[in-house]
Image (tube, rainbow, N blue to C red):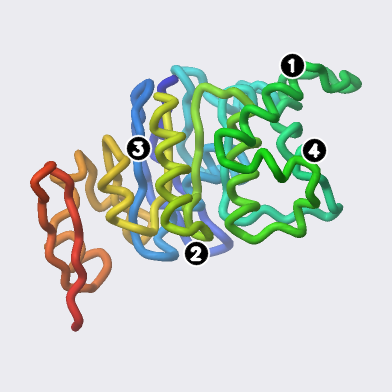
Amino acid sequence: MRIDAENLSFSWGSTQILKDVSLHAEDGCFVGLIGPNGSGKSTFLKCVYRVLQPKMGCILLDGKEITHMGYKETARRLGVVAQHNAYDFDFLVKDIVLMGRSPHKRTMDRDTAEDYAMMRDALRQVGMERFENRSFSSLSGGEQQRVILARALAQDTEALILDEPTNHLDIKYQLQLLNIVKSMHKTVLSAFHDLNLAAMYSDILYVVKDGAIYGYGRPREVLTEQMIAEVYGVRAEVRTDEHGQLSIIYRAQ
């Protein structure tokens, strides 16, 4: 599925958060968003998955504006792994993952054997199959994040929106989560805090600074020492190893 955001602007009161932001993700492309905290990455993603409504501009899925779709139709096409996942009630892990099947059901439909099979397969993919009957609130932050990814996998969508999905994860599970997402060959929009992970997994990177697009392109075109200095305000060395993988090494000021 292709995702296009055209000239998005968004404000909180008199404070403009997004300023004429455009982004394009081809079908099956992994697009990373990088930029400092408060630059507008999460706000942009929330506009894409319809938690926020942009003041100007439009978002299109395969050429169709999302405002012309029902919320359930959008949920059948976009799976979301957000930064914060709080629930007012204490659900079991399996119930959280089964929520991913809701967009495919009518209001009073019961969960089927197929739904349970998809739930268990999703938990297996993220290494949480033993936690099916555990309380979600009893899990660590990293374990909860893996369950939320499982919910998105069970949702069986054409595209995934990831808002800094690895923040609470140990290195092993950071790589596991992103390997799973990458192997699915879905269209992905993912905000990254870690530039090395962004370099490893993104086909295209967009740099967001002060609510506007600073630059975009392939990781080796975007991740330069000059960009890191200008956008993040730190000195860094960008290296390429023998396998062609970029790595960023930060220097003390």
For marks 4 and 3, give the one nearer the viewer: 4
Q: Nearer the viewer, residue 189 or 185?
A: 185
Q: Earlier in the sequence, mark 1 or mark 2?
A: 2
Mark 1 is surrounded, within 10 Å at the Cα level, by few (under 14), some (14 to 19) or many (20 or more) other residues, namely: few
Q: Secondary structure at mark 2?
A: strand
Residue 205 locus on image (x, y percent): 28, 43
Q: Secondary structure at mark 3?
A: strand
The C terminus: image quadrant: bottom left
Residue bearing the label numbered 1 = 114
Name the amino acid type tagged 2: Thr
For marks 3 and 2, give the one nearer the viewer: 3
Name the amino acid type tagged 3: Val
Q: Is residue 37 left or right of residue 95?
A: left
Check if mark 3's residue and mark 2's residue have beta carbons within 8 Å.
no
Q: Distance from label 4 to label 3 (Cα)?
A: 30 Å
Q: Distance from label 4 to label 1 (Cα)?
A: 14 Å
Check if mark 1's residue and mark 2's residue have beta carbons within 8 Å.
no
Corner quadrant of residue 63: top left
Mark 3 is surrounded, within 10 Å at the Cα level, by few (under 14), some (14 to 19) or many (20 or more) other residues, namely: many
Q: Is residue 156 left or right of residue 180?
A: right
Residue bearing the label numbered 3 = 31
| Whether residue 56 is situated above or below residue 60 in the rendered picture | below
Q: Earlier in the sequence, mark 4 or mark 3?
A: 3
Name the amino acid type tagged 1: Glu
**Where residue 95 is drawn, which disc sits there?**
4
Q: Earlier in the sequence, mark 1 or mark 3?
A: 3
Instruction: Tell me the residue at 82%/17% (across/down).
Output: 112
Q: Is residue 77 left or right of residue 8?
A: right
